Image: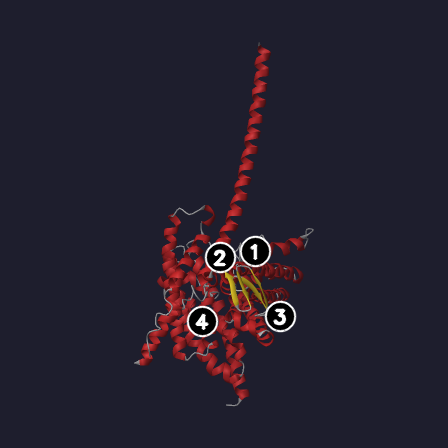
Amino acid sequence: MSIFISFILAILSSMLIDNVVLSRFYGICPFLGVSKKVKSSLGMGIAVVFVIVIATVICWPLYTYVLVPAGIAFMDTVAYILVIASLVQLVGLFIKKKSPALYESLGIYLPLITTNCAVLGVAQSNTDQGLTFLNALANGVGTSIGFLLIIVTFSCVRTRLESANTPKAFKGLPIALITAAIMAIAFMGLQGLFSGIKL
Amino acid sequence: MSSVGYLILAIAILVILLATFIISFVAYRRTPLPKGCEHLKMDDQKCSSCGHSECSFYKGEEKE
Amino acid sequence: MSREKGYTKKNFLKGLIAENPLFVSILGTCPALATTKSIEAALGMGLLFTVVLICSNILVSLLRKLISEEIRTPAYIVIIATFVTMVKMMTNAFLPELYSTLGVFISLIVVNCIVLGRAEAYASKNNVFDSLIDALGMGIGYTVALLIMAFFREVLGSGMITFGTIFTFIPKFSIPILKCVKDGVVIYDYSIQMFQNPAGAFIVFGLILAVIAFVKNRKAELKAYQEKQEKLKKAEAARLAAAAKANETSGGDK
């Protein structure tokens, strides 16, 4: 039971306290680029959750049971990017063949995920920090759900910003970045959320 | 297993990964789009998440 | 290939200003926000990035006739990942402080859109020399952009510019600007802590983009105004000429 609780806490902490976009700065490109409409940000977010979780499940054992015993742990980045890129292509292929409906909502965002630093960043930091498999999985799930949460929230704010009367020089990206800063300040308030909980 | 065996296994796995990537990439490019999805585009008409038209993935989407 | 005069210079300068990867194309934003806490870290990131970009551009340009159109992207990703691994190992060996400061962001150069974008858009179509110049321009442009951001963040956030913490081969010293510490005693401190935090990174980046948009808008508006004035002048002159002509003819009638 204690393992389960710590698993949930690890998910929550990598989702809220160490939020992927606002405090670790992974995946800023899609965060700024695909967040103009709520629908597209939802599609991108779900696709990212999907790929990050599967990539974590593959990359951690690959590193621990194959690369480290063979003594080529330095090849980790190459291995991870290969795993992620082929994963994205395979998922895209599967969706194209089997589910046109899913392709309609996720298909165009899939190829962009290969160059999303959140995916590689999570895989890399999992092994760099020497996490256990369960913690790595929690980190993957938490990070990706945190990304989904933040990109959808941000797109909601941005649709409102479109109709707001902003100064001309701030139209578009600058005001979006200032908004992100305010969100980051809000998320800073969550630090120490679990400091009172003892395990 | 000896360390040399592990090394060979690891390199084999890396090569397999590379092969998977290339094969799946080519297959993905060649698979036709499902019906009704031929004219899907990014909402912004321009993929701004990966910069302007330089991203190859975007160009690929446009061509299809 | 026929080339106009001064192409090399133009090719180099475009990465610095007209097509600056960070401030104009808004590419590579993740490291730009994450590694600009201090000027030294930004400089280190910019240098590593430039090295990877130059190497990958040269190799892609050399291999451009061998790699078939179909497997271009996978081949480029593998080339870039290999160079990133090499750079990472070098940093770990020779500049361990830089390695631990940048952390995972060295690996993330692999998925930096600028490197892949330059390989696809430029190096795969041009010769080695041009690709090298392009990579140099883009790399230096990106480094300068990172340094500008880091300058504001370090000065506002910590109050002073410190050297020697990451590049340990130079002696450690700091230039007091908003905060002055002498012999461990804080004399004055007007720094704003927030600029060292993630929120500060977003604010600095947003404000810089706003300033750039402001300058661009002003230029465009000034140009539009001048064009309008010229058109008005022309119309006025034409009207006057027509009036004079009409006057002449009518005067002739009388």
Dot 2 or dot 3, earlier in sequence: 3
Between residue C245 and residue C176, name the one nearer to us. Answer: C176
Q: Chain of mark 1?
A: C
Residue at the spot 32% in from the left edge and 75% down from the top edge: A197
Q: Seen from this angle, which residue lies furthest top?
A: C254
Q: Which mark is residue C20?
A: 1
Q: CA distance from mark 1 to mark 3?
A: 33 Å
Q: Chain of mark 4?
A: A
Q: Quadrant of residue A94?
A: bottom left
> Are marks 2 and 3 in one subunit?
yes
Dot 2 or dot 1, earlier in sequence: 1
Which residue is denoted by mark 3 in the rendering? C171
Q: Amino acid at mark 3?
A: Pro
> Are marks 2 and 1 in one subunit?
yes
Q: Which mark is residue A122?
A: 4
Q: Position of residue A43 (x, y in %)?
A: 38, 61
Q: Amino acid at mark 2?
A: Val
Dot 1 or dot 3, earlier in sequence: 1
Q: Amino acid at mark 1?
A: Asn
User: Mark 1 against mark 3, which lies toward the viewer?
Assistant: 3
Q: CA distance from mark 4 to mark 2?
A: 26 Å
Label 1: few (<14), some (14–19) or many (≥20) C-alpha neighbours in 10 Å: many
Q: Position of residue A190 (x, y in %)?
A: 36, 66
Q: Position of residue C223 (x, y in %)?
A: 55, 40
Q: Amino acid at mark 4?
A: Val
Which residue is denoted by mark 2 in the rendering? C204
Q: CA distance from mark 2 to mark 3?
A: 29 Å
Q: Chain of mark 2?
A: C
> Looking at the rendering, in which quadrant would you find the C terminus of chain C?
top right
